[in-house]
Image (spheres, grey):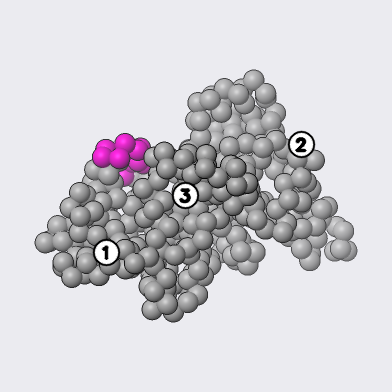
Amino acid sequence: MNHRDIALIQHSDAAEWDALVAQRGGHVLQSWGWGTFKGEFGWQPLRLAVTDGRSTAAAQLLIRPHYGLSAAYVPRGPLFSGDDLLDRALLQALRRVARRRRAVFLRLEPNVFDSNESAHSLHSWLQVQSFRIGEPLQPRTSIHLDLTPQPDALFAGFSKGHRADVRRAERNGVTVRVGTTEADLDTFYEIMQQTGARQQFGIHGRDYYAAALRLFGDAAHLLLAEWQDTAVAAFLVFAWGREAQYMYSGSTETGLKQGANHLLQWHAIRWARERGSACYDFWGIPDAFGRMARASADELPALEEEAKGHPLYGVYRFKKGWGGRVVRYLPAYDQVYLGALYWLWRRRRGND
């Protein structure tokens, strides 16, 4: 193979694909397990790569069929190579698949912070490739905690209030254990239901969380906090590659009063670090906080008001207290094939 002969590969081996994604620093949403997981809930995963034998560009593409049409989606990807010819070849392959599947649009959500040196050029390049800016399905702004310091140093970096709440929970007799049984999953789900009803947000069905635990194996961690022999809070977190994700959590009123969420988070952070994760992603805060980094002094007051009025403002305060930094990803990029239906699809937000 000479250096400009480009081969298209549709991967069918999980270990080979995950090795490629992990080597490139790819996100868990590009892992084989995530594609298989979403495959149990209406999505059809395809793992595509183009290579010239030296460099590789790759993407896990998820297809969501709907009434004879579909949406095509690359979450936290693709894994671009930086080589224009290879990257264009990957987009062409994705476009061909999307059109064959009668996709209304193809959506990319690059795993790139808007503060990265490459962000501006990638943003411009994708628009030259006929992609328009769209609203991402994944959180655009998050908080990332560097896990490379020793545990004592990590703990010292937490806010004074968070450190006090962790200690208070321990002092009051809150304990944490790993959930391993169907009964533990039932407990987790019951707490999620209570939390969703109290805070007025939707949750997935029990089968969704069960599939995540089954398919991710030891990369998924179910943690239960108990007080006086009763479960009062629960987390389901992931650690894949070099990054961990705090995705699903809930607590009872008692758990909130006892600081159980704080103790669970401290356990989850240490577990992720022990697994080799270098970063802990707190998974979503109001985007106004991300926009503040590039805002002018005149724009800041309005953004601060927007952030304080957001339903996730309390969640932000909880997440920020662990000492991480606010990060903001590039937006979504949509290539539209059926314009009128694209408008309708965006209105109904029928893809999860």
Q: In the visual, does 12 lie left or right of 89?
A: left
View extreme (front): residue: 298
| Magenta-drawn stretch contains 73 | no
Residue at figure coordinates x 31%, y 63% from the top left: 161
Q: Whole-percent x and y of residue 13?
A: 59, 59
For image coordinates 33% across by 64% down, the residue present is 162
Alpha carbon separation for disc pair 3 and 1: 22 Å
| Kind of residue at badge 2 | Ser
Q: Which residue is mark 3?
A: 284
Q: Are marks 3 and 2 in contact (CB under 8 Å)?
A: no
Position above or below: 273 against 298:
below
Give the residue pinned by disc 1.
Answer: 165
Judge from the rendering whether residue 293 lies leftward or rightward of residue 213; answer left or right: right
First along the sequence among labels 3 and 1: 1
Q: Residue furthest top?
A: 340
Mark 2, residue position? 130
Provide the residue span drawn in magenta. 197-206
Q: What numbered label is drawn on residue 229?
A: none
